[in-house]
Image: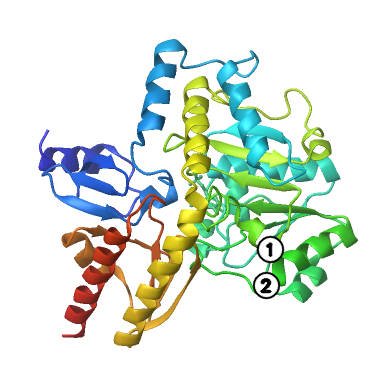
Amino acid sequence: MNEREVVNLEEKLMANVYAKRPIVITRGKGALVWDINGKEYIDCTGSYGVCIVGHSHPKVVEAVKRQAETLISCHASFYSDARSELLQKVTQIAPKGLNKVFLANSGAEAVECAIKLARKFSGKPEIIAMMGAFHGKTMGALSATWDKKYRDPFKPLVPEFNHVPPDNLGKVKEAITEKTAAILVEPIRGEGGVRVPPNGFLPGLREICDEMDVLLIFDEVQTGFGRTGKIFACEHWNVVPDILCLAKSVAGGLPLGITIAKENVMSSLKVGEHSTTFSGSPLVCAAACAAIDVLVEEKLPERAATLGRYFKEKLEGLQARHKVVREVRGLGLMIGMEFRFDVLNVILKSMDRGVLILDAGRNILRFLPPLVIEREHIDRVVGTLDTVMEEEKK
Ligand SMILES: Cc1ncc(COP(=O)(O)O)c(C=O)c1O
């Protein structure tokens, strides 16, 4: 198929729910992808944060090949060696005290499980989430998501979700009632503009939850797995939640959602009360085991911390040169660059010049590159942005 045929088929046959970029990507390696015409791009989208270990990491490829030849599917009502190995690896890297796991297929599903778990464990209905939060688009996760444009067409949503201003402990405390089961929060808001909370916020939430007997849920779907310079972003503040949600990158690019909880919390779910057909399929588990090995062996969180500082400094250099940049922020290789205007043109022009960048709202560029990205790539990204921003001035 040529480029036109691929585009035409997707346009004709696929639900029109994605804002498409006009390139057909056919190959990826590390931090690079190539389009159908052989043009190379530096991938600062990481497939929306999925490609932490890089595109087609050889260890993930090898594990998938090996497992595909052995056993691809095995329902969780049977035991599986690949699944048990993953459970062991996940609980070894998880924050201390989180040791019981539910496996699903996506970030939204990891959040759905957390919501059901909070209600079941506490016997209470209400979840407090943050204004500006993004937790996914299935009905439960959507009810915790803030943005009106995602929510309004689908009302009524799941009841008893209450949103409070972010980073404000007083407002959180005020919102807690005798019906509150849990507080759900992204340690760093991703879709909401790459917003790092003030230092006291997450420890303060932990204190409030302990004091008022409310569960604390961290959605680390975007921040987890080394992205911010630690395996989990909550480690920056030494705060352990009661329930942790993971997805995106945990299976090296294959679909996997993980909910990890304290044993007593997860044990409140009884046989049949929650399940999904693909829960912990051997193929995905083998890929995830390989991805965790790569994360640890290649010290990717440390790499994210070092390269993230380098990248941020370079972007701050651009901020000093171009008055259109309002702020550069983030942790590790999760970086946002806020402009004084709409960034769509910057994104499209950078793409023309071989750099893929995400947005996070109308005026914010978001960088979620694979953690295996090289300094030389970062230099090229910054050089490209410099040229594009210079052009935008004209
Ligand atoms: C913090 C957070 N939670 C949940 C989700 C939903 O994940 P998924 O798209 O895999 O359902 C996302 C997706 O971007 C996310 O960033």
Q: In this view of the protein, can residue 357 be seen by the observer?
A: yes
Q: Is residue 318 left or right of residue 293?
A: left
Q: Quadrant of the C terminus?
A: bottom left
Q: Amino acid at mark 2?
A: Asn
In-image side of 359 versus 218 (left or right): left
Q: Front-most of 341 and 390?
A: 390
Q: Residue at x 26, y 48 (%)?
A: 32
Q: Write the residue at 48% across / 31% down.
A: 290
Q: Between residue 266 and residue 174, name the one nearer to us.
A: 266
The amino acid type, in three-letter code, at marker 1 is: Trp
The disc placed on residue 392 is: none
Q: Residues within 10 Å of mark 2 (few under 14, many from 20)?
A: few
Q: Position of residue 84 (x, y in %)?
A: 63, 22
Report the Cα–Cα distance between label 1 and label 2.
7 Å
As helix, strand or loop, the secondary structure at mark 2 comes to loop
Question: Mark 1 falls on what kind of element?
Answer: helix
Image mark for residue 237 = 1
Identify the residue position indicated by label 2 in the image: 199
Assess whether mark 2 and mark 1 are in contact (beta carbons under 8 angstroms): yes
Q: Position of residue 202 (x, y in %)?
A: 71, 65
